[in-house]
Amino acid sequence: MIKKIIKSLSILILIIILAALYLSVFGIQTKKFNNEITKSVSKINKKIYLSLNDVKYKLNPYNFTINIITINPQILLGNSKLEIKEIKTNIALRSLINDKFLIDDLQIITKKIKLNDAIKLARSLKNYPQFFILDAMTKGGFINANIIIKFDEYGKIKENYRIKGFVKKAKLNILNKIKLNNFNFEFDIDSNNFLLKEINTELNNIKIKSPLIKIKKNKDLYFVNGEILNDNWEFDIQEFKTIFINLFNNINIKKIEFSSASNFSFNLDKKLKLNDLQVETIVNLKHFILNGKHLNLKSYFPNFVEEIKFENNKININYNKNIFDIKGNGNILLEDKSDNLFYQIIKNNNNLIFDSQINIKNNPFILDFINYEKKEGSSSLVSIKGNLQKNNDIRFDLISLNENDNKILIKGLDLNRNFKIIDIQAVNANYKNNKNILNKINLKKKKKIFFISGESFDASKIVDKIMDSNEKSSSIFHNLNSKINIQINKTYIDEINYMNDLSGNLKFHNNKINNLKLESSFPNNKIINLSIKSNKNMETITKLFTSYPKPLIKRYNFIKGFEDGNLDFHSTKRGNVSNSVLIIDNFKVKEVPMFAKLLSLASLQGIADTLTGEGIRFTDFEMSFSNRKGILTIEEMYAIGPAVSILMDGYLENKQLISLRGTLVPATTINRSIASIPLLGKILIGEKTGEGVFGVSFKIKGPPKNLKTTVNPIKTLTPRFITRTLEKIKKN
């Protein structure tokens, strides 16, 4: 009996083992539990309907569960149909024994389905607000996913779900500013972590890729970090600007081509709003071309035409809380010649801080306002530190130039958008200019007073600017209200002539000199004094006197060989109108080309020879003239000397048109005419008579370089000419 029982039990156990093995390996197919599976899925969301075919059941003897597998089912979600490759789930064996159908987990392996449909499925599982926003941004693409969901003993979804798969050809539109096309990546997602791998996409038509992006959830925040790689590409500039709006809104970019590697991190809130963006980027900049017309670089770099090119630059970029910190070095080309450049740019909202050094070797470099010129081939290091402010004013904390023994240092220079000086703190200069003149001079500012001192200074450029000034553009300052004290040992007014011990002061009000007093002397101990004062009648009175006018007169190319004499200049200016008198006495000129031509035309060859030979002496020269709106009107210019006298009037219009007329008479004719006056002639002239030489009247008109001259002989002198001559003779 016992043997029969043992045998029966053995057979039963064997049957059970064989059945277990069969169920574990092959399983069985049945539709018996389809309704229960469908009900369990509908507990997740009543809008989800699972359409099942035959379901295979396999035993898992290790954890006493039943594995359920269904092939090619369908998930119906609203109007969408999701094609599923297979669905797997586990049911605890004890639940079947207790006549309860409880799913432990659910694994859904999809076929290729639309990305928007997959997002709707995700929203049905967990209806997070970000899924709604993501659905609105997604404009296309497909997904293959492997979804694993675990349930508790009450049939509710646990938080430890996991979704793996890949996305192909996705399209996202973020606020109509950032567009992602051909977005391809692998993903691995659980309740608190999102991993995106092998990402390839086009960000606003810029191709980028990333090996890994991590997203970690903490309460209502998502912390995102990752790496982006960019191969060498040439980008569409307008698309590039839409990404970096705040950085490039004031920069005219023509071309950009580079490769880069970036590490980034940021936070997303539950509304997918981006915060705390940080980016660290290494850029290999192959080409970066700016339109630099508006920078007015031609006056500094003669080779410059329009474009600034950066080539083969290595750049580190850090972005944190709207602050861009860019450091780079490489080649800079002004048209076709390359020099080396280091730079750092920090952009904080509307304030842009810059620090740069450029080693200028292959390009010429000119600072025309101080007569400095660096030739091609000579190396000059220029350092510039400062910031571009919100109103486009520029603050230069430091500007330095070093070229061999030439050194220039400027501190605290403020310029407005028109490059006019607002303020300056200090200048130290020690250099030889393009005339080989040593400039060793300092400028310091204390409160509102500037102090200029030095051993040597070439002021020829300043003198030229004063003598050829245009009222609209003569000042390099924006609105100067200050006093300037000057003390310079040697001041050059041209390449040869200089003054010793220049001293004095200037006072500016609203960018205009209202008080000036300067004194100096030439090496021959001849003096020169200049004063400017403003009176209560809103008039500016200028006085210049020198007992050595030769260096000033020689600037005018229509007078050659000027010698001796004293110069006295007086001018009164009110508004835009000035009235002036220029007096020069006891001087001689070797050559006056304009009048030498007149004399030749008039056949006054003897005087012509004198003017072009040893020189002709004048006892007096006086010119009364006015200046208004670019028109210089000569009321009267009169010169008298032993050989010839001239009386003239006319005008010069904007230095483009000259119109003069007057009378030129040899001294013998003057003497004879005056001597013929009864009694007065004998008193003034005596019994002198001259040969029968006539004078001439003349007209000169035309552009300065193409003057037309006409002359007519005269037999009698005008009363005006005789009157002016008598006045001068009587005075002398």
Image: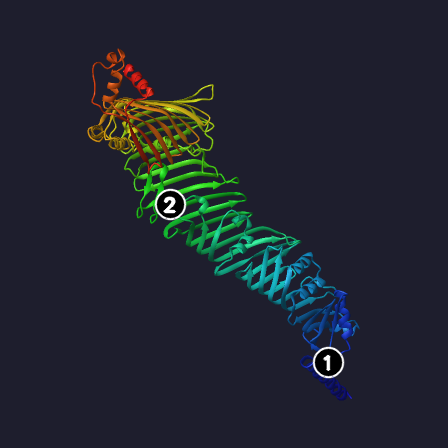
Which residue is tagged 2?
301
Q: Is residue 49 above or below residue 644?
A: below
Q: Quick one: 209 or 14, which is closer to the camera? A: 209
> Pointer 1: residues within 10 angstroms few (<14), some, or many (20+)?
some
Q: Quick one: 171 or 13, which is closer to the camera? A: 171
Residue 669 image-quadrant placement: top left
Q: Estimate the x, y position of residue 408 in percent, counting from the top left.
A: 35, 38
Q: How many marks?
A: 2
Q: Is residue 599 above or below residue 246?
A: above
Identity, as a three-letter code, of the amino acid under mark 2: Phe
Q: Is residue 224 left or right of residue 647?
A: right
Is residue 529 in sight in this rendering? Answer: no
Q: Estimate the x, y position of residue 95 in percent, counting from the top left.
A: 76, 71
Q: Estimate the x, y position of residue 481 in percent, counting from the top left.
A: 46, 27
Q: Is residue 633 left or right of residue 665?
A: right
Q: Is residue 350 above or below residue 620?
A: below
Please, which residue is most extreme toward the right here? 99
Q: Quick one: 171 or 718, which is closer to the camera? A: 718
Sequence-wise, which precedes: disc 2 or disc 1? 1
Q: Is residue 31 above or below residue 187?
A: below
Q: Estimate the x, y position of residue 264 in percent, counting from the top left.
A: 54, 55
In the drawing, what numbered circle is on residue 29?
Answer: 1
Identity, as a three-letter code, of the amino acid under mark 1: Gln
Is residue 341 in sight in this rendering? Answer: yes
In the drawing, what numbered circle is on residue 163?
Answer: none
Q: Quadrant of the C terminus?
A: top left
Q: How far, Cα to Cα, is label 2 from label 1?
A: 87 Å
Q: Circle 1 sits in a helix, a strand or a loop, which is it? A: strand
> Pointer 2: residues within 10 angstroms few (<14), some, or many (20+)?
some
Q: Circle 2 sits in a helix, a strand or a loop, which is it? A: loop
Tell me the mark number nearer the camera, choosing from 2 and 1: 2
Q: Quadrant of the N terminus?
A: bottom right
